[in-house]
Image: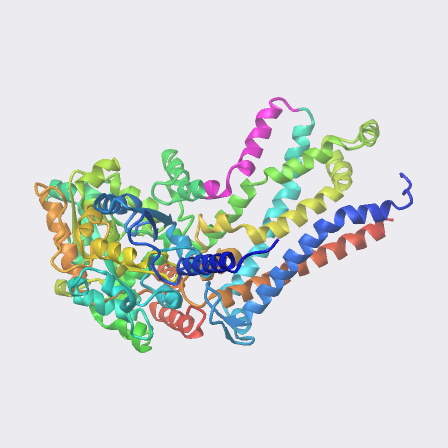
Amino acid sequence: MRRKLPGEGRTAVLFLAPLFLVYALYFAYSFWFLIGTSFTKVSIGFSNAVAVGWKNYRLLLTDPAFLTAIRNNLLFAAASIAVSLTVAFAIAVLLASGIGGRRLYYAIFLVPALTPIALVATVFSRMLQYQDGALNQGLRAIGLDGLTEHWLTDSGWAFLAVIGLLAYLIGLPIMYYTADLAALRTDVLEAAVLDGAGPLLIMRNVIHPMMRSTHITVTLALLLGSFRAFEVVLLSTGGGPDNTTEIVGTYTYRFVTSAGSTIGYASAASVLVLIVAMLVSVVQVLVTRTKRGASR
Amino acid sequence: MTISRMTFAVLAAGVVMSLAAACSNSGSGTDASTTGPITLKLWTWTGAPGGEAMKRAIDAYTKDHPNVTITNTEVAAADFKAKVPLALKGGEQIDVLAVQPSLFAEQIKDQLLPVSAWEKDMPSGTMNKFQPLALEQNKKLYSDGQLYSVPFGLSGSAVGFYNAALLKELGVQPPQTFTDMAALAKTLKDKKPGVAVAVMPSGADSWFQDEFALTLAGQNDKDFFNNVRYHNGKWDTPAYEQALTSLRKIYADGGLDKNVIDVDYAGAEEKFATGKAAILFNGTWDSTLLSPDFRKANKIALTSVGAMPVPAVSDPSARSLRSFLDVTMGIPKTAKYSKEAADFIAYVTTGAGADLWSKNLGLFPAVQGWTARTGDPSFADEEAGAKTIQALLTSPHSDRNNMSAFSAEVGKKVLKVIGGSDPATAAKEMQDDLDSGKFN
């Protein structure tokens, strides 16, 4: 490891200070404003605000739709993470193993992640419509009419449809894994091969544990990203049927874009989501620290 | 360096005059000039009445007023409620503002000039030209009973647009009841498999389900919505529960098609425009479908389209809709040219401009004596449809003075009822939501 030069820390602080200051001011002001607004009843014009104390928070915490939205956020994140740590990881390893037509496969998996999510969600929504959707049309064409479903209006299927859509967007985790696989120590893999380990064993017992830091990055990115999976839900199910697929983004959006004095309520929802997201991050940091400590 | 008293006096006078001139230009609804070239800044949202439609009126007005240029900032409808209050608060020059006749109007009231301040700048008698119902509805928008905007256009919901050529081919009259609808569905199944009896915005645009359920509720109790909206009436009344029960039964009996309840707004329009649905239920803002020119310009291949009220659950004479002002026009306090703005507003609301922007029937002007025309009298179904809609708009069962986010919430629950949930429980949940106070 390179030794620190005298005064290097101070120079770094000097260079970083302006950026930190801008960030600190930006976030401090945003949080202060958001928290202040959350205790009022006010419209988007932010004039004539009426103090309502904790009322907005009380309403939110007793609103089943909001609690469902938070739960859905976490469930969608869990599903996304599960798919990424298994399917995306396996795909990345396969692609890194020198499989033929690699570039084509990369394109197939990465293009959805690079396409605007709004477009992907709209196309999916059309594909899943009961009468003219491509999925049901396809099933009918091959005589499997009995398997057609109301994918977007049946609660259970709608929930799975959103998970399917999120799973389709695994390009980013594949990219993370691909980048880190390129830097993987090949001597360890060679040793495993010499010891007679098969491909599956190598993937599960050698590569997977060696990619632990990537798993953490992917998990954290997806977990926090799930709080911003707004377009996916809004343009596919609209949060329905009956809030089954509602997430906090779509829930808050309705109150922000509606007329009336609903901005205080939307701000309170945002503060609560912020707290949940921070708790998730803290838990994540603690868990990874504990594991790192144990592995030392 | 020394300055003589005379020079000082001249300089001081110059400074004072400059400041006075600057102050007179600093907004608050005062006029800067009435002679030189001026640019009026108009803000509307998409569909109010639409960029192309408004351009026709603007072009004609500016031709008659060569010193006036008008820029129309057309904001996406979904963003309008959020952007306008912030722009006004930021002091943005807006001379003419399309004011959404909902809670939004009251929300920005303090940033608008009262009509009494600029009424004198409109041609004499302008206020008497508005439809009395429209003026009455306009007054309901503001809690202090004053007018801060004037009526521009009306719309209502829900109505049906039918593929007249298809119904003629099948030998079927436009349905008057949902029993007729079920019969039409059966005929379609036999003779035109794959064509849905009706489609409407749903799925991700479930807010329209609220509109449709309220139209049915009006058949049971015409005062239902006004009671809720203006008199703190209950939402979970027997009349509303009955409407939900009827709706569920209509779907079960085939009068409406459960297989298309996942279709969103654009999808519903597309299905009807491509002949995959015999009837489209939507608001009267879709009356553009009655305009042959509009259909041609938008490559909609339907040869003949008619309009009808939403069919009755039982008694056809109960068919009606909720209507309300769709657009009103006001002058913000940030206006630079309030006098010219008032003149332009008079032109587009009660003057020749109303005929120009309403040519494609997206909105119906709120001026007395205006008659809906499709532009080509040889299209009999369209002509009759336009008149049907105008008649419905002028005799609604209640106001379509919506409660914004609450509509979306109700729409989802209506969909749940269509899926089989208990109407009474759903109505109770809606009541609880309304009582919570989070929607206003």
Query: Furthest-top residue in view?
Result: A100
Q: Residue at x 40, y 55 (%)?
A: B93
Q: Main secondary structure of the magenta part?
A: helix
How far across and down, in percent of the image, does residue B82 sit? 44, 58
- Looking at the picture, tell me which residue is in the foreground, B122 or B409: B122
How far across and down, in percent of the image, does residue B51 sit? 30, 45
Residue A85 can be seen, yes or no: yes
- Looking at the picture, tell me which residue is in the foreground, B432 or A43: A43
Which image quadrant is residue A136 in?
Answer: top left
Is residue B378 rendered to the left or right of residue B139?
Answer: left
Which image quadrant is residue B272 in?
Answer: top left
Q: Residue at x 55, y 68 (%)?
A: A38
On screen, residue B74 above or below A187: below
Is residue A262 rendered to the left or right of residue B403?
Answer: right
Is residue A83 rendered to the left or right of residue B384?
Answer: right
Q: Total label count?
A: 0
Is residue B361 rendered to the left or right of residue A98?
Answer: left
For the magenta stretch, what is the residue range?
A99-121
Residue B263 can be seen, yes or no: no
Which image quadrant is residue B108 in?
Answer: bottom left
Q: Residue at x 80, y 49 (%)?
A: A13
- Tell whether position A132 is magenta: no
Quadrant of the drawing holding the C terminus of chain B:
bottom left
Display colour scheme: rainbow
- Tell whether position A103 is magenta: yes
How far across and down, in percent of the image, does residue B344 sit? 25, 54
How far across and down, in percent of the image, does residue B88 sit? 43, 59
